[in-house]
């Protein structure tokens, strides 16, 4: 990735040329290798929120999603199915399940290439925003684990601590643009200088709303559009645990570091004594 000539000096600070810069990432098949909603179908089933038929339907939908992505009609059917399915669920129970299983289920699915790209943007002082059609109770904890600054996700109406089955905001298609424009207004993002990454042709509005769009693992239609528009195309293929990327140092390394530190302290003390004698 080429360096910008107008990088920010400090994370989150305005640049000399204009507003702040953000990188907007779609989640499923862009940052993680599977559908984030599908990942939690098993613990939801184990906790009695889903029946066996719903799990099988979820598995089949995920299979089609991996093969060809999802078009507009499929996304609308998925939205209707998911909201009807979660009607009556206890919100706190859902949050608890996600919190308890996040590390085990999602962490190993994060693309190493996506994690590197997110780290690169953060080093350059850019905010990272996860934008997903999945529910905010799922997207929020994943985004937090990735170190994202903000999230934009689907919100379902809640009454008396339970989902009603009605959608307050569906973060999909042009609605993703609505979400990022709202963030841009509150956070001072200069969208022509911002970045966006997605795998799906349904995210063309979001990709077209920024100055630096990139197709990641694109479906056939997005690949065609990206090629026609001259957008970069990236392939992410290496899911890896974030924890595995930050292994604790071995005992040998710790011992060697301690020895070097001790030597430095001794050398400094001797130098100080010699200087005092000369004086």
Image: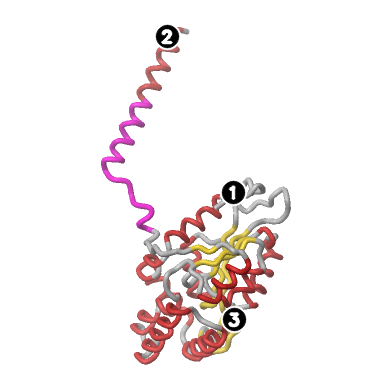
For marks 2 and 3 on the same chain, the one whose residue lies earlier in the sequence:
3
With respect to residue 83, does 175 lie above or below? above
Which residue was labeled with disc 3? 170
Which residue was labeled with disc 1? 3
Please give left or right for residue 29 compared with residue 193 in the image: left
Q: Residue furthest front?
A: 228
Magenta segment:
243-265
CA distance separating discs 2 and 3: 76 Å
Q: Residue at left 63%, top 61%? A: 212
With respect to residue 6, does 29 lie above or below? below
* Circles 2 and 3: CB atoms closer than 8 Å: no
- Tell me where residue 265 appears, x and y as whole percent: 37, 26
Q: Where, by quadrant of the figure, is residue 130 drawn?
A: bottom right
Q: Indicate whether residue 20 is drawn in magenta.
A: no
Q: Where, by quadrant of the figure, is residue 164 drawn?
A: bottom right
Which residue was labeled with disc 2? 277
Q: Residues within 10 Å of mark 1 (few under 14, many from 20)?
A: few
Q: Nearer the viewer, residue 257 or 205?
A: 205
- Counting every numbered tag in the picture gives 3
Main secondary structure type of the part rendered in magenta:
helix
The kind of secondary structure element at disc 2 is helix
Q: Nearer the viewer, residue 242 or 43?
A: 242
Q: Residue at left 65%, top 77%? A: 174
For marks 1 and 3 on the same chain, the one whose residue lies earlier in the sequence:
1
The kind of secondary structure element at disc 1 is loop
- Tell me where residue 222 appears, x and y as whole percent: 56, 73
């Amino acid at each position: 990735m080429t360096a910008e000539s107008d990088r920010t000096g400090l994370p989150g600070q305005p640049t000399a040329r204009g507003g702040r810069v953000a990188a907007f990432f779609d989640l499923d098949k862009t940052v993680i290798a599977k559908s984030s909603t599908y990942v939690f179908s098993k613990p939801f089933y184990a906790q009695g929120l889903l029946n066996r038929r719903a799990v099988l339907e979820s598995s089949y939908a995920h299979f089609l999603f991996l093969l060809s992505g999802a078009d507009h009609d499929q996304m609308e059917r998925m939205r209707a199915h998911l909201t009807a399915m979660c009607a009556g669920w206890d919100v706190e129970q859902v949050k608890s399940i996600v919190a308890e299983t996040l590390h085990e289920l999602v962490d190993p699915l994060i693309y190493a290439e996506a994690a590197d790209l997110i780290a690169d943007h953060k080093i350059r002082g850019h905010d990272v925003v996860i934008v997903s059609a999945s529910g905010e109770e799922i997207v929020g904890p994943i985004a937090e684990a990735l170190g994202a600054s903000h999230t934009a996700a689907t919100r379902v109406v809640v009454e008396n601590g339970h989902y009603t089955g009605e959608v307050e905001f569906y973060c999909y298609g042009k609605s993703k643009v609505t979400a990022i424009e709202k963030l841009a207004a509150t956070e001072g993002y200069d969208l022509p200088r911002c970045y966006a990454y997605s795998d799906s042709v349904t995210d063309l509005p979001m990709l077209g709303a920024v100055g630096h769009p990139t197709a990641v693992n694109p479906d056939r239609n997005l690949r065609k559009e990206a090629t026609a528009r001259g957008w970069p195309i990236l392939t992410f293929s290496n899911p890896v645990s974030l924890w595995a990327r930050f292994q604790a140092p071995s005992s040998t390394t710790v011992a060697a570091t301690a020895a070097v530190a001790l030597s430095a302290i001794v050398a400094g003390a001797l130098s100080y004594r010699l200087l005092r004698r000369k004086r």
